[in-house]
Each structure stands twice: as C-alpha cells, then as structure tokens.
Image (spheres, rainbow, N blue to C red):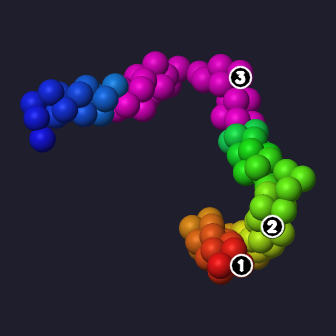
Amino acid sequence: MTLHIFLMLLLMASIVLFLRFLPFMIFAGGRKVPEIVEYLGKTVTAAAIAMLVVYSFYGSLEFSTEGFSRFLPAAAASLLTVILQYFVKNPLFSIIAGTALFIVLIR
C-alpha cells in the first residue's frame, strides 16, 4: 500500500469519526436536543427502509420475463424476513434467512 492510499484512508476514517462524534460534542453537558432532531431520529430510519424496499423491488417489476422472474423469489424472501423479524426479533437472523431463501429460490 502506498503512502498516498494510506493517507487517504486515514483522512476518510478521521472524517467519519468526527461526524459520528459531532452530535455528542454539540449536545454535551446536558444541552437539550431540539425537537426536530428527535423527530428525524424517529422517522428517518423507517423512511430509509421504505425507500430501500421500493428500490429493491423496482428492478424486478419490469414487464419482461427476466425482471419478473426475480419478483416472486424477492417477495417470498421479503415476506420471510418480515415474519421472522416479527416473531424472532433478531434482525441479523431475519436478514440472513431471507437472503438465503432468495438465493435458493433464484438458483
């Protein structure tokens, strides 16, 4: 690894760490978190997941045989993931099981 690549990685890691610690530095000392930040903290996760679901299914909703042939396995795997998450409440297990089912179904 060259020095240039190492310095780039170090700079990127430093920026990521700074951005991760920034909220703790801003709201240190018991400062009240603004309501808009609390609202965004509650809603952005669900909105991001909804956007990922729409994006994931968008490619499989084409009106071609190849595009639609992935819709049914994707729908079955997504349904399994949702059901497992509802009952087991372990995200890692649910995601791995859904991914495994999808891979088995498309093969």
The residue stretch that appears in magenta? 16-44
Q: Amino acid at mark 3?
A: Glu
Q: Earlier in the sequence, mark 2 or mark 1?
A: 2
- What residue did someone put label 3 on? 35
Mark 3 crowd level (few <14, some 14–19, many ≥20, 10 Å Cα): few
x 84%, y 62%: residue: 65
Does residue 69 appear to the left or right of 19 in the view shown?
A: right
- Number of the label disc, if any, that sits on residue 67: none
The answer for how far apart the CA atoms under marks 2 and 1 are is 10 Å
Spot occupied by residue 62 in the image (x, y as percentages of width and height): 85, 51
Which image quarter: residue 35? Answer: top right
Nearest to the observer: residue 59 or residue 31: 59
- What residue did someone put label 2 on? 69
At numbered mark 1, what does the secondary structure look like: helix, strand or loop? helix
Spot occupied by residue 93 in the image (x, y as percentages of width and height): 59, 73
- Number of the label disc, if any, that sits on residue 105: 1
Nearest to the observer: residue 1 or residue 16: 1
Residue furthest to the right in view is 63
x 19%, y 32%: residue: 5
Q: Is residue 20 magenta?
A: yes
